Every structure is written in C-alpha cells, then in structure tokens.
Image (cartoon, rainbow, N blue to C red):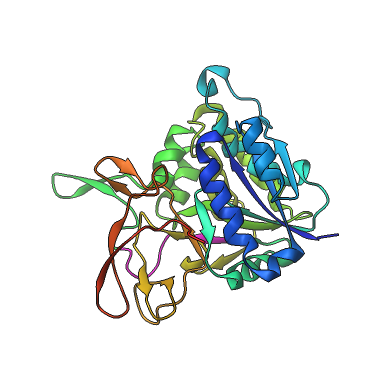
Amino acid sequence: MKKNVIVSLADSNYFELIEELVDSIKRFKESSEVAICILDAGLTDIQIEKLSKKVDEIKPAAWDIEVPEFKVKGKEWLKSQVSRAFLPNYFPNYKKYLWIDGDAWVNDWNTVELLIKACDNGKLGITQTVGPGYKITSRVDWLFGKLAIIKSQNFKHAIKSKIGMEKARKLAFAPHINIGVFSLEKNSPGWKIWQKNLETTLKAGNIFGSEQLAINMSVYIDDLETEFLPLKCNWLTSNLLPKFDEKNQTFVEPYLPNYKIGIMHLAAGIWQDGKDMRNNKDIKIEIDTLENKKIIKSLRYTS
C-alpha cells in the first residue's frame, strides 16, 4: 500500500496539461512508491478512461463548502478553490498529501521528496512567492507623492472578503503564499484551520483566490507551523522566467548557483500574441541559457 499521494484536479480544458503532469511524475522510477490521484471537475468520459490507466484513483470534485450557485454556475473548475482543502476526505488511505496544480509539472524528483519531508509533524510544506530576482512583491498607488494605497494581493483579497481590517493589515505586506504546490499530513491540524478560514473567505469574496487567501490567513494569522521551501519547489514562470541548461537539458533558476527547477508552474499563463502557452503547446518564448545564448522554447513538459 502506497502511503503518500500526489493529487491534482482537472476539467476537460486542462486534460492535456494534467496528462503532462502525470507523465512528468511517472518517468521517475521513484514514483512507483507514490500514488497519483485526480479530482475530476469536468473531464469527459473518454478523458477519464484514458487517465485512469495512468493514475491510482479519480474521483469527482464536490463543493465541500456551500457557495452561491450564481457565483459558480458553469464553472466546475472552481471546485479546485475548495476541494483541495479537503483532500483526506476524498482519498483517505494516505499519510501525506502533496498537491500540484494541473498547470504544473515535475522536473526534479528531489523536489517531491523535499515536499514530502517538509510536512513532517503536522507542518505545512509550501513556498512563498518571493526570492532572488523578484523586483516587485507588493504594489501601492501613491497619492500626492506621499500617501500610499496598498494593492498587495493578500490585502486586496482580504478587503474584498471582509475578514476585518486588523487581519487584512497583518496580511498586507506578508510574502504571498501560492497554494499551487503544497504538502500536508493527513492528521495535520492545518486542514481544520484552513477549512475554517476558507468558510470565512467564501462568504463575501470571490470564489477564485479564496483558498489562497485562506492559507495565507492560516500561516500569518493563525500561526500554522510551516516549512517554507525554496522557489524551485513551485517555480512561477509568470513571475520570473527560468534559464535553460543546454549541457544537462534542463530548466534552472536564472541566478547563481542556478539550481535545477523542481516544479515548473505555468500559473497565470505565458502569453504571446494573445495566446496562452497552457492552451497551445505551439507557443514558444525566448529564454536565456547558461551558455549565454538565447533560444526559443516552450516551458511545458515534453517527454
């Protein structure tokens, strides 16, 4: 019996991406010791049949917390904003849960091992979206050159979700936490803390982003014990492009010592001429190499 599991979610539009994620995991021999489970938020029968040959379990995602129908009608994929906070309810037979968004893929198995280790003793294993090369971490609008209106992602979502000004201020300049990759043990108190905050954020705020605000609240307000992991564990390409190591044929961080990127995450997309790389594998962009060259390349997984 496999004791740890990697979970993701997909609808029919993300099927090609979820296949790439699964393939990127299964190419490593060590993956045979880890289960792969998928939450279905609108896959077709044919897609489910094809995917079921590659993964351990597929289960339909549900609205684990009741939300107004007018906010989510026709948007089954928004279940990812709720269901990932309830993973042990869907797949109860595992000790540790590693979530990877459907628009991400695994480039280095050591990162998977690091995430599994990070959630020991009930801790949350996760990455803050701040690091070398990040030139802007929070945005403000300046009035009269002196007064600042805070526009940080945490603060903006906190105000919209009406969690209270005191809590919003605590989040205002805290390094934002991206929930696209995380790990938690089954018996971690983190699940209940997260679910409690998620109920709060869903009441008034947008569905999209609610679970991310809730996990930021859990860490920065409720002091959920957290193992903060390096950027390579959740490399957000829209924030900072990687470099390519031609010698070893792999993506690496753009600054010394050029660590190998562990999980490539295409959150927010990579856009060219109005087209998103997540929806079109033909989209390629110019990136630098370690050999001081420029090449045209896709950031999606290729076997």
**x and y percent of residue 293 in the render?**
24, 75
Residue visible at 52% across and 66% down in the picture: 107
Residue visible at 61% across and 51% down in the picture: 222
Which of the pair 138/183 is nearer the observer?
A: 183
Q: Residue furthest right?
A: 1
Which of the pair 87/204 is nearer the observer?
A: 87
> Is residue 102 at least partly visible in the picture?
no
Quarter of the rendering occupied by the N terminus: bottom right
- The rendered magenta stretch, by its main secondary structure, is classed as loop
Q: Is residue 83 above or below residue 179?
A: above
Which of the pair 177/293 is nearer the observer?
A: 293
Quarter occupied by residue 292:
bottom left
| Image position of 293 (left or right of 152) | left
Residue visible at 34% across and 76% down in the picture: 255
**x and y percent of residue 295 in the render?**
27, 67
Magenta part of the chain: 125-134
| Image position of 154 (left or right of 78) | left
| Image position of 266 (left or right of 283) | right
**x and y percent of residue 265 in the render?**
47, 55
> Is residue 248 at least partly visible in the picture?
yes
Quarter occupied by residue 188:
bottom right
Residue visible at 79% across and 58% down in the picture: 95
Magenta segment includes 132: yes
